[in-house]
């Protein structure tokens, strides 16, 4: 059900969950200091309890309430990119809920760049945890209608229009000594972060640590299967291969639809073509996948973006959504 800003604030203060808009995706919000409310997020999303949540705060002044260390590098990044699609992972104070931290020693913080989200945070005086407002591993919502289609119309939804960034935030961890690492790619790039940080990211990791990170994701969105439509999805590097697969499926009596990136010949099925710019693809990606998923065809055929640093975030979302 759609609710007003005042109703959304009242629900959050009662310990309920509310879907709220941000510039990235719609989040399923709850008071980040209320463990019972936080557990409703996990129950609603059917999300494993060991997955940390991102805490959304209204401005940089609230960071000190959550962390033991706010290194100079992290301060520079926050000053440069907040409000915006950057999440900082920092050492958490002892009082920060283990539920919101996923039992990690760190907490993830972000100031969203959306007028409705910021108004909610400032008027309520709350900080809210807000993972994507969808069932675990399924497509993230970028409109209020997507939330309702995925979670049902009983969930209160604060409608703030379509999201403008369209995919989840870049997540960066910063250690007390100022070392930083991109934990989830987003539309704020590694190069942009390195320029502000004044140093490259730390890349040396033990193999054991990598294996443990894959077994138990430590930040949102790193599960091997994520951002997935209900319809089986297959990825193709080459459009000719995609078109051939479409033709073969149709000859076998099956149905398909395709998502293409950039200009070129299209297969003989329902097609959505996104412009060949990374920011435009990111903005429209989930909306296009929602639309194709609603067709209820047998298979979705998706063209991968070209190689290059500008496409890393889109490529990450697509490879977690399907397989080659």
Image: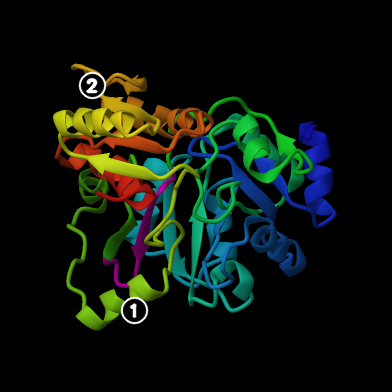
Q: CA distance from mark 2 to mark 1?
A: 38 Å
Magenta region: 168-179
Query: Which residue sits at x=29%, y=20%?
Result: 275
Q: Are marks 2 and 1 in contact (CB under 8 Å)?
A: no
Q: Nearer the viewer, residue 215 or 104?
A: 215
**Sequence-first disc among 2 and 1:** 1
Q: Is 121 displayed left or right of 276 in the figure?
A: right
The disc placed on residue 315 is: none
Which of the 4 image quadrants contains residue 236? top left
Q: Secondary structure at mark 2?
A: loop
Query: Which residue sits at x=53%, y=58%?
Result: 63
What percent of the width, then of the height, locates residue 80?
A: 36, 42
What percent of the width, then of the height, locates residue 81?
A: 39, 42
The disc placed on residue 212 is: 1
Residue 176 seen by the camera: no
Which of the 4 image quadrants contains residue 157? top right
Above or below, comparing residue 233 to residue 173 in the picture? above
Residue 251 seen by the camera: yes
Q: Residue furthest front?
A: 252
Q: Is 184 displayed left or right of 163 in the figure?
A: left
Q: Residue furthest bottom?
A: 208
Query: Which residue sits at x=60%, y=51%?
Result: 130
What percent of the width, then of the height, locates residue 76?
A: 34, 51
Q: Secondary structure at mark 1?
A: helix
Q: Nearer the viewer, residue 324 or 221?
A: 324
Above or below, comparing residue 289 to residue 109 in the picture? above
The disc placed on residue 262 is: 2
């Amino acid at each position: 059900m759609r609710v007003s800003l005042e109703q959304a604030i009242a629900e959050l203060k009662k310990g309920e969950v509310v879907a709220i808009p941000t510039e990235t995706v719609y989040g399923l919000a709850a008071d980040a200091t209320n463990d019972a409310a936080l557990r409703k997020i996990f129950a609603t999303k059917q999300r494993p309890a060991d997955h940390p949540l991102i805490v959304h705060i209204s401005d940089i002044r609230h960071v000190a309430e959550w962390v033991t260390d706010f290194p100079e590098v992290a301060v520079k990044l926050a000053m440069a990119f907040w409000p915006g699609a950057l999440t900082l992972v920092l050492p958490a104070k002892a009082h920060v809920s283990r539920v919101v931290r996923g039992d990690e020693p760190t907490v993830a913080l972000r100031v969203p760049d959306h007028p409705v989200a910021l108004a909610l945070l400032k008027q309520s005086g709350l900080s809210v945890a807000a993972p994507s407002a969808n069932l675990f591993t399924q497509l993230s919502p970028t409109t209020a209608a997507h939330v309702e289609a995925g979670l049902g119309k009983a969930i209160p939804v604060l409608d703030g229009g379509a999201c403008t960034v369209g995919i989840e935030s870049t997540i960066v961890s910063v250690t007390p000594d100022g070392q930083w690492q991109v934990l989830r790619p987003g539309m704020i790039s590694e190069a942009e972060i390195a320029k502000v940080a004044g140093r490259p990211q730390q890349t040396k990791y033990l193999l054991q640590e990598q294996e443990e990170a894959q077994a138990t994701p430590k930040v949102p969105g790193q599960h091997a299967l994520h951002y997935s439509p209900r319809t089986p999805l297959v990825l193709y590097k080459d459009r000719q291969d995609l078109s051939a697969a479409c033709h073969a499926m149709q000859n076998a009596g099956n149905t398909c639809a395709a998502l293409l990136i950039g200009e070129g010949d299209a297969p003989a099925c329902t097609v959505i073509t996104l412009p060949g710019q990374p920011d435009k693809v990111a903005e429209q990606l989930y909306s296009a996948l929602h639309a194709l998923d609603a067709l209820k065809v047998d298979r979705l055929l998706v063209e991968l973006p070209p190689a290059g640093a500008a496409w890393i975030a889109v490529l990450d979302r697509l490879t977690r959504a399907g397989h080659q």
